[in-house]
Image (cartoon, rainbow, N blue to C red):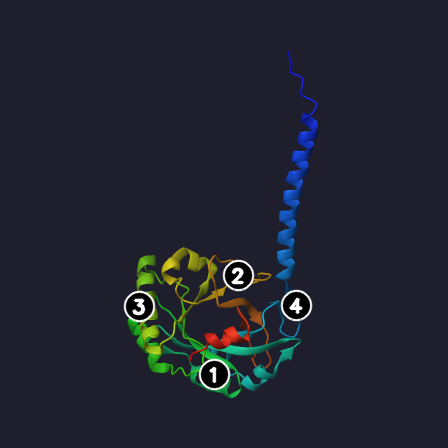
Amino acid sequence: MSRRRPKWFLPVLLLSFLITAMIVGISVFSKWRKYQKAASTHYPEFGIMIPDDYLIHGIDVSKYQDIIAWEEVKKMKVGNVSLGFSYIKATEGLSNVDARYERNWKKAKDAGLYRGAYHFFIASKDGKMQARHFIDQVDLQPGDLPPVLDIEQLNGVKPAELRKEALAFLQVLEEYYKVKPVVYTNVEFYDRYLGHPFDQYPLWVAHYYQPGEPRIGRGWSLWQHNDEGSVNGIRTRVDFNVFNGDSLMFREFLIK
């Protein structure tokens, strides 16, 4: 014999359905509002989408950008977006010096941009020796950006060895320059190979074509959000970055 449902069953079921729908709706609306707040705007002059709500923009360059007219880079302004800083490749591995480093280092400052230098790390080489190579080439002054370890490849070594040599590199730079070096890498590489031992260092994270922020589960200082930008004074495409903070926080980020 089938059991008859009580009279209150359908109203309670309907109420439960309405409450569930309301909760789902609020969640979807919150995510939509977050997405709208974290929007990007297309700038035809720069040729890319640039995330809104960031005040300080910059680029990073190497010999692949050829000879740069830095004064044109500095003068370019579209709406509220202008370029205030540049990271410049200095060294790689144990002995390589970027062919445009000396010129870029001088001319970027002459044009009025804040400048910083980075080292492209070879994980199969000794970390301390790579750090000394960078130090031999890079004279950082008050007002410059902190030095950067660019780490993107395993180079055939095990992750534990990569972490050991990279931490050795960072420790030598921190002791010499008296500032925490910045770690540059992409989201996947950080999560897979670096992680907790590197959480003590400021992060410059590469994560392209995101609407408002990189998808990483730790704090970050710089975000490389696009690698296809166009800038007056540079013939090639160039990486675009934003700083995660206001002008006061940016000044605090600089070397004292």
Element marked by disc 2: loop
Mark 3 neighbour density, 10 Å: few (under 14) some (14–19) many (20 or more)? some
Labelled disc at residue 168: 3
Q: Quadrant of residue 127?
A: bottom left
Please state, as top left, top right, bottom left or bottom right, where the C terminus lies in the image. Answer: bottom left
Q: Vertically, is 102 above or below 161?
A: below
The amino acid type, in three-letter code, at marker 4 is His
Q: Earlier in the sequence, mark 3 or mark 1?
A: 1
Q: Earlier in the sequence, mark 4 or mark 2?
A: 4
Mark 1 neighbour density, 10 Å: few (under 14) some (14–19) many (20 or more)? many
Front one among 185 and 85: 85
In the image, residue 142 lies at what x, y percent? 43, 83
Mark 4 neighbour density, 10 Å: few (under 14) some (14–19) many (20 or more)? few
Element marked by disc 3: helix
Q: Which residue is mark 2?
A: 214
Measured in 3D between alpha carbons, the distance from the residue under mark 1 to the one under mark 4, in whole angstroms, is: 28 Å
23 displayed left or right of 89 = right
Q: Which residue is the extreme one toward the bottom? A: 110
Q: Nearer the viewer, mark 4 or mark 3?
A: 3
9 displayed left or right of 250 = right
Labelled disc at residue 104: 1
The amino acid type, in three-letter code, at marker 1 is Asn
Q: Vertically, is 217 above or below 68?
A: above
Q: Which residue is mark 4?
A: 42
Q: Earlier in the sequence, mark 1 or mark 4?
A: 4
Measured in 3D between alpha carbons, the distance from the residue under mark 4 to the one under mark 3, in whole angstroms, is: 41 Å
Measured in 3D between alpha carbons, the distance from the residue under mark 4 to the one under mark 2, in whole angstroms, is: 18 Å
Mark 2 neighbour density, 10 Å: few (under 14) some (14–19) many (20 or more)? some
